[in-house]
Amino acid sequence: MRAVSAVGDDPGLWIAVLVGGAILAWLTHSWRPLLLLALVMIGAVSLDHLVKLIVARTRPSLSFQLVASTGWSFPSGHATESAAVYFGLAYIAGNQTRPAIKTVLYAIALVAVCLIGISRVYLGVHWPTDVVCGWALGGAWSVIVLGASFTIQDSP
């Protein structure tokens, strides 16, 4: 579960943003996918920190934690950021391909995001509500950024 959790930490997500964004930039001959993914990541990190400061919820007891974790608990940063990045990546990549592949990309993103969130509860560093709200916050941020981006792109 520690390895699954590591896929949702900041370095792992930045690798996904940079590699996925670079591949999409190469395929589309545009820097737009990379810039959108970077905006999604930066915004998700910022929202996570802002909400943590506002809510200031403590983490589960140290006796339950299988890994060391500091800071506030709500929302889960791993859940927030992984939902934003992996769903954003699936959405942007899915627009470049056939519907069947788009479905597979969303399924992979969904499984990854769910496993990352579950790993945080299993490792004892978050309450289940921290993860569920993190998923909602990250997903909403991704929808806002990508929806606005493609609306602006499609307008005359």
Image (cartoon, rainbow, N blue to C red):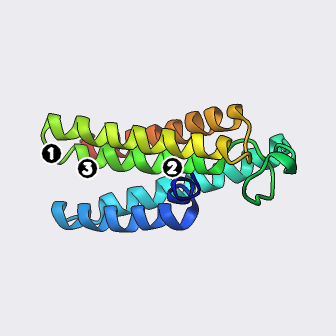
Residue 32, image x and y in percent?
A: 31, 60
Crowdedness near tag 1: few (<14), some (14–19) or many (≥20) residues, C-alpha within 10 Å:
few
| Residue picked out by circle 3 | 93
| Residue picked out by circle 1 | 97
Label 3 amino acid?
Ala
Q: CA distance from mark 1 to mark 2?
A: 22 Å
The quadrant in which residue 99 appears is: top left
| Element under disc 1 | loop
The quadrant in which residue 45 appears is: bottom right
Left or right of residue 107, residue 9 in this image: right
Give 31 or 76, whichever is nearer the viewer: 76
Residue 73, image x and y in percent?
A: 77, 46
Q: CA distance from mark 2 to mark 3?
A: 16 Å
Give 82 or 39, whichever is nearer the viewer: 82
Q: CA distance from mark 1 to mark 3?
A: 7 Å
Residue drawn at x 12%, y 40% as measured from the top left: 98
Label 1 amino acid?
Thr
Q: Are marks 1 and 3 in contact (CB under 8 Å)?
A: yes
Residue drawn at x 48%, y 43% as measured from the top left: 113
Label 2 amino acid?
Ser
| Element under disc 3 | helix
Residue 82's disc number: 2
Residue 119, image x and y in percent?
A: 59, 45
* Residue 21 visible in the shown view: yes
Residue 142, image x and y in percent?
A: 46, 43
Q: Are marks 1 and 2 in contact (CB under 8 Å)?
A: no
Residue 86's disc number: none
Looking at the image, residue 25 lies above or below residue 74: below
